[in-house]
Image (cartoon, grey):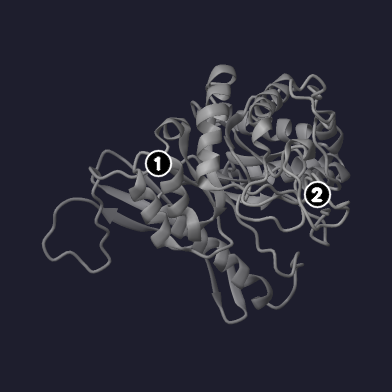
Amino acid sequence: MILASASASASVQVSWTQTARLGEKVTLLEDQTPFVLSSGECDGCPDPAISVDSKQTFQTFEGFGGAFTQASAVNWRKLDATGQAELIRAYFADPADGGLGYTLCRVPINSCDFSPESYTFDDVEGDVALEHFDSTVQKDVDLGMIDMILAAEAAVKERANRTASKGLKLKLLASPWSPPAWMKLPVHGVYGDPGEGIRTMTGSAKPFGLDPDYQASWANYFGKWLAAYKARGVDSLWAVTVQNEPEASPGWESCLWTPEYMANFVAEHLGPTLNATHPEIKIFGFDHNKDHVAEWADGLYKNKTAADYFTGVAVHWYGGLNTENLQKAHEVDPTKSILGSEACNCIGHVVLQQDGVASWWTRAERVSLDILEDLKWWAVGWIDWNLLVDVNGGPNH
């Protein structure tokens, strides 16, 4: 971490801290000896020189953060008031005060795999007009998600006021794992299938799961969910993704999509609906691993009507760094954004504090490398997964 303090002169004194590992010895955020950087043209500059071209600019960065999953909220609710406040402080306080300075977070629409159970806000089959939609989003209130988000919003707002950071506020990205089961096409050959297929949140028909007859209802569902969260006092809603991991149906909430079907849905339904009801909300496509992001960017933006609604594409880290694919996705349309929307060291679940550095250092290196490479290759933000899990890595289902 490097902090530079400059006067009107051409030199700046740089204070810096270092986290490093040498064998079993680890230094965490250890202050190092300050040094001076001098700017300007020079012949015979020493080797440790940094060349900065201030005329060349890249993407505008939105922030770092994590996900307000149902699991995170359930665990946060279990803490006493002091513990709850400390967790919010640790994530959202200014880095100068020991916090991580989070400003960009994610929240599921309906349940996700890190939820105690599957649920939606309208389980009335055939309710095309969504007359039975729970506009109180009571389930998310009961789980603690709304209170946790409001606490984070307040922390970021307080930070903005104290540091006179104009415009600083929390931004929320909302993502669905699955529409209500009744909006989906039947899945055949799975548990509970009586022979003619079964509509389920925890599985998906191929090549896409959303029933075409319910596209308009599903688009309106987004709008009602956004309105319900706003009515609960949440004012940090910033963007949505069309679908979490549209290429996977692993046994929990999921819904498969093709690039063409997603583009048509946005062009004909979701885009016009949000433009009419929540015009400030951005739309990101894809929201899956980087190995296929270029193909999806091409498929989504080929639909010119959809392209006008898409802010960009979101990516997950599970398929590897794939920096060449991030570059290709950028080249499909350099005006569109790439957002790192999910990352998680899943293998082994929780690593408790131990004497052996190797048990956690590699995981930290992987996260650091992914952040650095994503930012180098056009990412406008980077969002971690669960903000808080228990010692078993849950609750989930």
Numbered tag placed on residue 302 in the rendering: 1
- Identify the disc placed on residue 197: 2
Query: Does label 1 or label 2 sit earlier along the sequence?
Result: 2
The residue lying at 83 percent from left, 39 percent from top is 119
Helix, strand or loop at label 2? It is loop
- Residue that sits furthest to the left in the current view: 43
Residue type (three-letter) at the residue carrying disc 1: Lys
Q: Quadrant of residue 344?
A: bottom right
> What is the CA distance from the residue labelled 1 to the residue labelled 2?
33 Å
Residue extending furthest toward the front: 196
* Count of labels in the image: 2
> Residue 49: which disc?
none
- Disc 2 marks which amino acid? Gly
**Are there few (<14), some (14-19), or many (20+) residues within 10 Å of tag 2?**
some
Where is residue 327? Give x, y as percent. 37, 55
> Which residue corresponds to the image point at 29% horizontal and 55% vertical from the top-left?
37
Do we see residue 382 in this rendering?
no
Is the Cβ of the residue at disc 1 closer than 8 Å to that at disc 2? no
Residue lying at 80% horizontally and 31% vertically, measured from the top left = 121
Secondary structure beneath disc 1?
A: loop
Coordinates of residue 139 in the picture (x, y in percent): 84, 33
| Pick the front one: 33 or 111 | 111
Would residue 306 appear left or right of 172 to someone viewing this image? Answer: left
**Nearer to us in this view, 282 or 2:** 282
- The residue shown at (44%, 53%) is 295
> Within 10 Å of the Cα at label 1, are there few (<14), some (14-19), or many (20+) other Cα atoms?
some
Q: In what quadrant of the picture does the C terminus appear?
A: bottom right
From the image, state whether disc 1 or disc 2 is nearer to you: 2
Residue 323 image offset from top left, x and y in percent: 42, 61
